[in-house]
Image (cartoon, coloured by chain):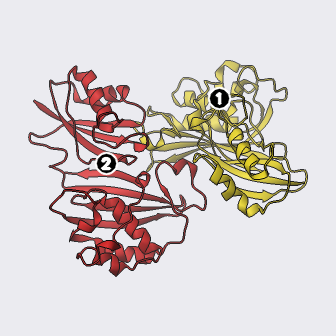
Chain colours: A yellow, B red
Amino acid sequence: MQIIRLDISYDGTAYSGFQIQANARTIQGELERALAVIYRQKVRLVGAGRTDAGVHARGQVAHYNAPFNVPVERIPLALNALLPADIVVTGALPASPGFHARYSAKKKIYSYTLDRAPFPQVMRHRYSLHCPIPLDLEAMRAAAALLEGRHDFRAFQASGSAVRDTLRTLYRVELKELPAEELLIMIFEGSGFLYKMVRLLTGSLLRVGEGKIKPEELAAALTGCRPDAAGPTAPPQGLCLEQVIY
Amino acid sequence: MQIIRLDISYDGTAYSGFQIQANARTIQGELERALAVIYRQKVRLVGAGRTDAGVHARGQVAHYNAPFNVPVERIPLALNALLPADIVVTGALPASPGFHARYSAKKKIYSYTLDRAPFPQVMRHRYSLHCPIPLDLEAMRAAAALLEGRHDFRAFQASGSAVRDTLRTLYRVELKELPAEELLIMIFEGSGFLYKMVRLLTGSLLRVGEGKIKPEELAAALTGCRPDAAGPTAPPQGLCLEQVIY
């Protein structure tokens, strides 16, 4: 049985997240419906990251066990013809035996986009958080540097999460200014992310940027001393899963 | 009575164009509804360009006669609080007596965006035409140069249009490649545009790019020799009114 790896991009605005749910439109649900048409049977898809409602992806990865072989180079076009316009399969490849979209992933890269224009840029409003207030980027970069590394990110997961091992490595937290586009993009590259971790990191960095907490106070959330220093959770529309690295 | 000039941007996807219509959502309709709340009476808005259904704007301009004075610097925020998220007022200024958003306009700049990625870029699909096929940009640029200048653009207006004077000046037809973003943006700067003229020019240039007609054949549409060389009409979602120059 052939394992197929899919590369997927989507505008998550209209969806209740990646993961399939009863009575809700989900990315996985739309993809499995299209796969069922191609393979004439139910095909279970496994995604690398279960993005939340309203979160986007340019580089989501998923895999499935193909019930029979079809020419892989035709799979993206065949799926895209069956999918709504806000989900686009950008690649399909036969994967090595044992490949698992989630468990084989080594790193993930997320971006969070802030619209820095005085008034919201209307063609960005689905894909960014409008944040026109002054931000202390130097303080945000200092905090970002303190967040990088291997830490217990327990304070940076949504309450109610049942994950036990909350040790994660953040390889990179970068703030990219695009002055011509009036955007500020935060890049988060990590070994893995806890539930809502990127949005909690973003909300925390914004509080640092507003001068409401100091970089060292935020860092104290990593040692368990100041769990309250983490958050709030930034809204979903600025978040995008950019890449999964295997 | 004070004349107020508004600068307006919008994502036209959900609208039946700028101009007010019964039983249809329009940009003008939404703006007039918001103005009626602020001024507690009907206020008639005049737009510089009546963009079609699905067409966007980053730099639409409109004016209205204010029934009474309110601090102009507060008008954008007040209107934006009443408008849906896909219409954003980016500026309000008191205009000189006699200012008319349409008749005072000297030039307009439109852009038409082509998505050149192999598969549609999902975060661009509302704002571009996906066009992954090879295009002869040299031929398109030669045709663009032939279109520039003062010409009778009769062949480049939608049939059924009642405009008599079809002489217009195209100051600039520029093709901008953005390789990193996999976009090709066509810029049209003109004294004014006939009904659907930019979309007809775009469709014509694409036919040149595909090698289906030669630049000189397209130019012959300007002299009345080959009216059939113009068109087809490119779809609306790639079009954006960028700027109105007074």
User: What amino acid type is highlighted by mark number 2?
Assistant: Thr
Q: Nearer the viewer, mark 1 or mark 2?
A: 2
Q: How many marks?
A: 2
Say if residue B74 shows up in the picture: no
In this image, B163 relative to B16: left or right? left
Q: Nearer the viewer, residue B207 or A221?
A: B207
Q: Is residue B133 above or below residue A128?
A: below
Q: Position of residue B89 (x, y in %)?
A: 33, 36
The chain under label 1 reads: A
Res B134 → quadrant: bottom right
Q: Which quadrant holds the N terminus of chain B?
A: top left
**What label sits on residue A211 in the rendered view?**
none
User: What residue is shown with label 2?
Assistant: B51
- Residue A185, horizontal then vertical, whole percent: 56, 43
A201 or B157, which is in the foreground? Answer: B157
Cβ–Cβ below 8 Å for labels 1 and 2? Answer: no
User: Any mark on residue A200, and which?
Assistant: 1
Pick the front one: B158 or A121: B158
